Amino acid sequence: MNKKIFLVLVLFSLVLGCSKKQEEVEEIVPEVETVVFQSGDVFSKTFDQTKLSSQEAAEILSELKKHVNINRCRPNDFYEITYSTDTDREQTWTNFKYFPEGKHFYSINKSTDNILSSEKLELETTSQTYEVSGYIENSLWESMYSQGIRPAVIMAYADVFAWQIDFVTGCRQGDKFKLIYEIKTLEKKGTVLSSTIVAAQYFTDTNSYTAIRFEDSKGYEGYYDPDGKSVQSAFLKAPLQFKRISSYFTKKRFHPILKRYRAHEGIDYAAPIGTPVSVIGDGIVKKAQYSGGYGNLVIVKHPNGYETYYGHLSKYGKGVKKGARVKQGQIIGYVGSTGLSTGPHLDFRINKNGVFFDYLKMKMPSAKVLKGKDKEDFDIIKEPSLDVLNQLH
């Protein structure tokens, strides 16, 4: 009987001991304070909302200034202060993390002997893939937005097929869209870091278009049809947003200034002065200077013997000079009326191997065709995307 009583007492003491230890563990759980910046906040003043002393706040700010300009904090930036209880049951801060806009944050640690150390770190990201399909009711924007697709994804989808479809005028009720896209977010903030179209399709009554994202061996990303041909044409449909075409390509046109007939081997796009002019394809600037009747002129040399002319410009785009490399869609100048001109317009011309031709009748070449190892790799990665697209209804 005494033995039983002894065992009961031992068990009781163990339970009490465990309870006390659990209470002690609960007592030293670190406390985290969070402060979110509001419009007009001054960094140093926000510490008034915390348990920090003025000296501790000053020490943190001094360390933080090694990494960032504290006068540039923005609304919704925030910081976290971690407190722990020491052996004397006094609460002290041990870690400070500042999360400004972007994917980086700054961490300041205080050692047991009150030495501060800091570092710049990168937030972890999470990725989620979405698969969506639907029909066009009124417009591409409304139809996709009604399914909860983010605006940035809708714009990216339109850009993928920009060389095949004009979604402003070419959409028809009953057209169908399918897409697979990936959203990357910053874990701590939930902020969207990027949105990427993985694969997409668009169906009309008469045509279907497919685009699959692929990065080639040189690190260039693009979208290709199932045969490995880029869905991006080598050239844009037009070098600017224009009001009307005031003069077409012709071998015989009456010149309004010279008062005689002569060839006009280009297209005049009427547009207000200052309208941005974009280069229609990748290339190298061959010329960027005043050139007689052309006025301010830019000539760009493209692959496969093509050259394009942009005349009567009011001024040149940033960095546009002889020898500069330009990318499709880059602004190379602005509409003007320099040289022999009766009003603001762009004189646009294109030739191949020195022979000018009518750009409006040109069959657009593909920007790129995958070959060799790139084509082999593409054929492997395209199949899973095509399978998913085929299963979307």
Image: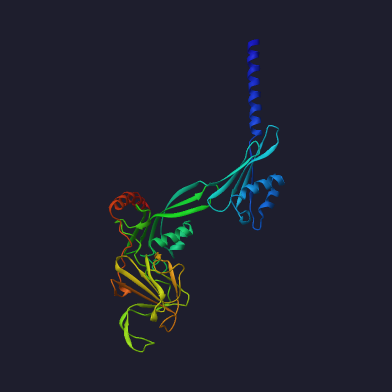
At a point 47% along the width and 59% down the height, the residue shown is: 152
Task: Look at the image and tell me whether residue 1 can be seen.
Answer: no
> Which of the image's four quarters has the N terminus?
top right
Looking at the rendering, which quadrant does residue 133 occupy? bottom left
Q: Position of residue 356 (x, y in %)?
A: 30, 75
Q: Could you tell whether 57 is left or right of 350 in the image?
A: right
Residue 51 screen position, x and y as percent = 70, 44
- Looking at the picture, does residue 370 appear above or below residue 340? above
Would you place residue 234 above or below residue 3 in this image? below
Residue 368 visible in the shown view: yes
Q: Quadrant of the C terminus?
A: bottom left
> Observer-nearest residue: 112 or 176?
112
Quarter occupied by residue 159: bottom left
Q: Nearer the viewer, residue 290 or 246?
A: 290
Q: Nearer the viewer, residue 171 or 358?
A: 358
Q: Quadrant of residue 72?
A: bottom right
User: Residue at left 46%, top 54%?
Assistant: 195
> In the picture shown, does residue 87 fall above or below 73?
above
Which residue is drawn at the image coordinates 66% and 58% (left, top)?
40
Coloring basis for residues: rainbow
- Of residues 50 and 23, the one nearer the viewer is 50
- Provide residue 281's location: percent of width, then percent of height: 37, 66
- Number of numbered discs present? 0
Question: In the image, residue 97 lies at what x, y percent?
Answer: 60, 46
